[in-house]
């Protein structure tokens, strides 16, 4: 990929990265490549974290719970002012899609590397975004564009579009505020419960009805917008391997799209971005029905966890693109310059136990030997000796593997996963190897129901001793309780009270089972 030099002078001399973990390290690396000085922020448990060690400067912002540190916008802005940072890059999660924070940053005279608060608010409201997409000619799932409070009205809508239907919170996300209704008799109770959950979780009880698409595929398109009405797509990613509504493996190109369907869905993504004069990097998510119809799902107004997959197959640097747009330099790629080459897979390495319903795990990274070789990239936020805390998302690293075609990418992935050795917390590396051996994945026919239908935890690993089992159960219960309190950090991250205990549920694993 040839890069156009769109800026004769470097405008940002220093940027603060308002995040932690692997994404903070990735952004810091990209900024350093551009000759920009970097500032990290950190909490009590992250004093020696890799993103802190990687940055030129670091500022302490509070106690371990994200609600006292990474989610406190005033502290982040104060850190930027203290260090003289001209801009803030939010990464993903935490404050990355927080409209009031974006607005406060710009009111403080600091550049927010991302979209405006108004863009976030339009796309964060599912009803508003449905109406916007329909007006822009982007397909949306059949359903309502207004909130529904009367069960009889909801039943009439369901009768018209056909059961099953999905009740969905307008302000929802992360799998919260959704219920599937299979028949009219379930509607009143389901609507009452969904509205209650929406009000408690999002302070907005607006709920709408849409057709429930059974066994879809999850396809998303990377876009870049200049904030002045022009946008380009950077092709698609398939993200249908999910557990608990969260992606664990992504690939690009999608094995599910013909050239014609790819062109159609990418054009719809560009229309989505241009409809709101989108600024920065964003991702338009679609569901692909078994019959080949695709529908707008939502737009993530930030850099995605899985952005390296796109970078590997297009030769782009999406962090650099974000910075250039934020500096006012516009798009650094034309649509004709953007091409897909080869195939890439990304594997999210989580500190979690697949045999225990993917329960989170913590502990010290006692040994870490990453794979190497052609087409292998590792984005990580940990190192040997680092203690994985309970307070945040359990992602340790992302392994991204490229090949000339899908078969080579899968073969290289198997080799890389088997070479990857991690001693410490229980992790999901062997799970990824299991996925690569499944016929539905190999032939590309897998859907979002794949893990639920094919993975049997009971057959996964030998039974653990009673003490370890109890510790894992306790950690899982604590993590879920913390998640429900709502202090979200990085994708899936949570804030929690400080804890004196440490989970001793450690197991030595390598990728080779």
Image (cartoon, rainbow, N blue to C red):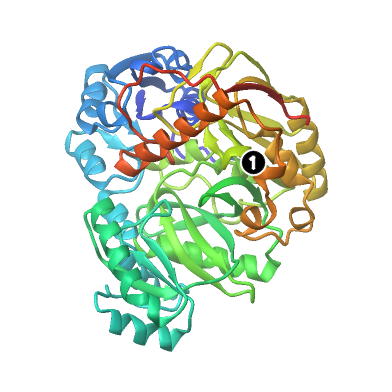
Residue at point 54% right, 52% down?
Answer: 334
Left of 19 or right of it: where is 236?
right
User: Who is closer to the viewer here, 400 or 83?
Assistant: 400
Residue 435, how many percent across, how many down?
72, 46
Give the residue number, with chain letter if any, for mark 1: 346
Graded by Cα atoms within 10 Å as few (under 14), some (14 to 19) or many (20 or more), the crowding at tag 1 reads many
Residue plotted at (39% across, 21% down): 38
Name the quarter where the N terminus is drawn: top right
> Vertical placement of 484 versus 206: above or below?
above
Q: Identify the residue shown where x is 79% and y is 58%.
A: 443
Q: Is residue 25 left or right of residue 384?
A: left
In this view, the residue in front, 502 or 433, is: 502
Q: Compare residues 458 and 187 and report the one nearer the observer.
A: 458
- Percent of width and height locating residue 237: 60, 53
For this orientation, the residue located farthest to the left is: 107
Q: For residue 253, say whether it is visible.
A: yes
Please give the name of the residue rendered at 72% of the width and 43% of the height, measured from the top-left corner. Answer: 459
Residue 230 location (% of width, % of height): 42, 58
Secondary element at tag 1 = strand
- Name above or below for residue 155 compared with residue 267: below
- Residue 349: x percent and y percent? 60, 33
- Residue 91 visible? The answer is no
Which image quadrant: the C terminus? top right
């Amino acid at each position: 990929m040839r890069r156009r030099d769109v800026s004769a002078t470097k405008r940002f001399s220093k940027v603060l990265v308002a995040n932690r973990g692997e994404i903070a390290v990735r952004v810091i690396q990209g900024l350093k490549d551009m000759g920009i000085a970097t500032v990290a922020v950190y909490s009590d448990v992250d004093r020696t974290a890799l993103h802190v060690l990687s940055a030129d400067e670091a500022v302490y912002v509070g106690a371990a719970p994200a609600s006292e540190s990474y989610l406190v916008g005033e502290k982040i802005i104060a850190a930027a002012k203290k260090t003289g940072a001209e801009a803030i890059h939010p990464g993903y999660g935490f404050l990355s899609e927080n409209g009031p924070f974006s607005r406060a940053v710009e009111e403080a005279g600091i550049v927010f590397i991302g979209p405006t608060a108004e863009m976030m608010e339009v796309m964060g409201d599912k009803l508003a975004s449905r109406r916007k997409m329909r007006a822009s000619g982007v397909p949306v799932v059949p359903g309502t564009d207004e909130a529904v409070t009367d069960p009889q009205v909801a039943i009439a809508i369901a009768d018209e579009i056909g059961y099953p239907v999905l009740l969905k919170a307008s302000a929802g996300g992360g799998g919260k505020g959704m219920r599937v209704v299979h028949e009219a008799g379930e509607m009143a109770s389901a609507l009452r419960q969904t509205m209650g959950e929406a009000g408690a979780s999002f302070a907005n009880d607006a709920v709408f009805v849409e057709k429930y698409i059974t066994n879809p595929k999850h396809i998303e398109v990377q876009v870049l917008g200049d904030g002045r009405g022009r946008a380009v797509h950077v092709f698609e990613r398939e993200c249908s391997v999910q557990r608990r509504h969260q992606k664990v493996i992504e690939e690009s190109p999608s094995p599910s799209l013909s050239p014609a369907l790819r062109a159609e869905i990418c054009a719809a993504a560009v229309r989505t971005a241009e409809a709101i004069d989108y600024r920065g990097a964003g991702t338009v998510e679609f569901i692909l029905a078994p019959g080949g119809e695709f529908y707008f799902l939502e737009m993530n107004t930030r850099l995605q966890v899985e952005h390296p997959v796109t970078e590997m197959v297009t030769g782009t640097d999406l962090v650099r693109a974000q910075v250039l747009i934020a500096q006012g330099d516009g798009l650094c790629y034309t649509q004709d310059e953007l091409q897909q080459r080869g195939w890439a897979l990304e594997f999210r390495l989580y500190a979690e136990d697949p045999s225990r319903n993917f329960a989170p795990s913590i502990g010290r990274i006692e040994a870490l030997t990453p794979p190497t070789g052609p087409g292998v990239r590792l984005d990580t936020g940990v190192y040997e000796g680092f203690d994985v805390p309970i307070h945040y998302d359990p992602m340790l690293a992302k392994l991204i593997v490229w090949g000339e075609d899908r078969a080579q990418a899968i073969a290289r992935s198997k080799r890389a996963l088997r070479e990857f050795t991690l001693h410490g917390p229980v992790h999901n590396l062997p799970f990824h190897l299991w996925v690569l051996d499944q016929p539905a994945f190999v032939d590309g026919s897998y859907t979002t129901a794949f893990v639920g239908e094919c993975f049997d935890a009971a057959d996964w690993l030998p039974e653990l001793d009673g003490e370890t089992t109890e510790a894992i159960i306790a950690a899982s219960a604590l993590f879920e309780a913390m998640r429900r309190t709502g202090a979200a950090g990085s994708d899936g991250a949570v804030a929690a009270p400080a804890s004196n205990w440490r989970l001793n549920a450690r197991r030595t694993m390598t990728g080779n089972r």
